[in-house]
Image (tube, helix red, strand yellow):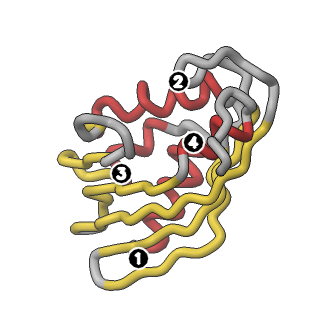
Amino acid sequence: MPNKKVVHRYIDEVVNQGHYDRIPELLAPQFLLHFPGYASAVERASLPAFLGKIHNAFPDFHLHVHDLVAEGEHVVAIVAQTGTHQGEYLGAPATGKTFEVPMQIVYRIWDGKITDSHPLFDRLEILEQLGVWHRPRP
């Protein structure tokens, strides 16, 4: 399966739709999610619980793929993440507000499976759009 297709299926089927039964097909046993702000990487076995927390806070959480760029064993996804704040997120109670924040994710594919995921986004922008934090302005 081409690398871009593996990444697209992972985003659509696992992250967006919660089909965790597809994880063994798409992620290598040694898979690591290097999530910004976390002291250690999220391992494959912990991924359903990790994604479940996001979906508890934002039941309609979705990654909208704008572009996938592949070079060798790497795929870069240019996405927009969206959601409606319906549950606790980073200590903030539900606000009912929506957010849309761009995200770039670098994936490494080996032997047809994702081994690493490195997302990059502005978490403070999410909190600001939810109205639970305000960026200091000069």
For label 2, the residue is 90
For the residue carrying disc 1, how many other residues have a C-alpha within 10 Å: few (<14), some (14-19), or many (20+)?
few
Q: Label 4 to label 1, Cα distance in Å?
A: 34 Å
Q: Are marks 1 and 2 in contact (CB under 8 Å)?
A: no
Query: Along the line of sight, which residue is nearer the eye, 131 or 29?
Result: 131
* Label 1 or label 2, whichever comes before in sequence order: 1
Report the amino acid beneath label 1: Pro
Mark 1 falls on what kind of element?
loop
Q: Quadrant of residue 96?
A: top right
For the residue carrying disc 2, how many other residues have a C-alpha within 10 Å: few (<14), some (14-19), or many (20+)?
few
Q: Label 1 to label 3, Cα distance in Å?
A: 14 Å
Task: Identify the residue at image location x=43%, y=64%.
Answer: 6
Of the two numbered discs 4 and 1 in the rendering, the one whose residue sits closer to the viewer: 4
For label 4, the residue is 124
Of the two numbered discs 3 and 4 in the rendering, the one whose residue sits closer to the viewer: 4
The circle drawn on residue 25 is 3
Q: Label 3 to label 4, Cα distance in Å?
A: 33 Å
Query: Whole-percent x and y of residue 30?
Result: 18, 47
In this rendering, would 71 be left or right of 133? left
Location of residue 12 with respect to 93 vertically, above or below = below
Q: Label 2 to label 4, Cα distance in Å?
A: 11 Å
Task: Identify the residue at image location x=39%, y=65%.
Answer: 106
Q: Are marks 3 and 2 in contact (CB under 8 Å)?
A: no
